[in-house]
Amino acid sequence: MVAAPPTRNPVVELIEHLGGFADPAAPPSASQLVALLRKELARGLGQVGLPRAGYDRPLVVPFAAASGQLAAVIPVPARLRNDAGLLDGQSRPLLIVAAALESLLLMADQRPVVPGRSGLVAQYGAWEGALVIAVSWPRSSGPDAADAELAALGFDEQLASADRLRTVGVGLPAGAARIVLTGLEFDEANGHRHPLDVIEVLVRAGVEPAAAVASLTDAASAYRVLLDATLGAAVAGHRPHEDPDPARRIARRMLQMLMGKRKWSGGTGAGYHTEVTHLTRGFEARDRELAGKVVDALLDAGLLVEKTSVGQRHVSLLSRRAADITALVDDGTVPPDLELPAA
């Protein structure tokens, strides 16, 4: 009788798949696997916006199951959840998001569309600067590593023929999944009819990921009625990242980011602040000087409040100006006391 070949440890196989070396004489290490994933995600974040992404080696998208959630870590900047305009003109990163979300929702049996924003089930977090999409598991048992592996396979099928894009989904073993997901904070995408919310509604309605992404730039989208019914009618005027006025666009995007991070203060110094350099860093180099002037204008108008800490400038949204801030973000209404700088 021929002896059956020894069963290989899945952690060892995954480490080797990611280009690492697993010592067969030593127990496989979940921490070693997670270290490799960090490097792979950093590589993916650097490549995802290129004309041809993943051609030297496919971009890795880990799927993980832990604490009643099934999640995917996407090589797309996590700031997308608070800054809808981050990927302007880049459909390929959103295609990765849509394919991963479709696979997660299918595995979690969350495909039917539920009217109203309260019916959305996907939440978003950050790991190593990458966007994490998580879906709660509706059943009492699971999810487990097998569910993560199946989700990864479904993701691969969705993007098998994607144009100028090569990706590979990997299901994480339980130990690595716990390291990645433990302690992460999840929240909704910030902004009315955020692209992430639009994609969720469409893929839950059975729309293919590529078509869902294409609808984001289609003013006459065939799905407008569905989106209006589930997310509310589109706000009149330009969205923050589409505003044609440079200073107003920067102001709206800044305020939108701070709202998403819940950086509110009563004006006494207490509250949640963010450093000014962090606020302006999200803009392209050519816009950063203007962004600094916009911060000063928002402070002069009292929409932002400043706190100096260890020699650094920190700002937060002034709570009593919430109505003006929301109006400026939602439809570009500039309050009378705000004088934005010329571009």
Image (cartoon, grey):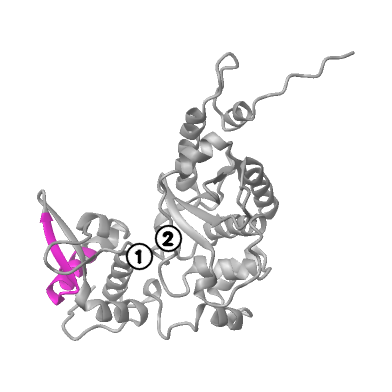
Compare residues 113 and 93 and report the one nearer the observer: 113
Image height of 158 relative to 6, above or below = below
Q: Nearer the viewer, mark 2 or mark 1?
A: 2
| Element under disc 2 | loop
> Relative to residue 83, is residue 36 drawn left or right?
right
Query: Do the numbered discs 2 and 1 sit on residues whose CB atoms are within 8 Å?
Result: yes
* CA neighbours of label 1 inside 10 A, class few (<14), some (14 to 19), many (20+): some
Dominant SS in magenta: helix
Disc 2/disc 1 C-alpha distance (Å): 9 Å
What residue would you read off at disc 2? 187
Answer whether residue 299 is magenta in the image.
yes
Q: Position of residue 136 (x, y in %)?
A: 55, 56
The magenta span reads 291-308
> Relative to residue 142, is residue 191 drawn left or right?
left
| Element under disc 1 | helix
Q: Position of residue 254 (x, y in %)?
A: 29, 67
> Relative to residue 95, is residue 266 drawn left or right?
left
Residue 335 visible within the image: yes
Name the residue at 60% across, 26% down.
12
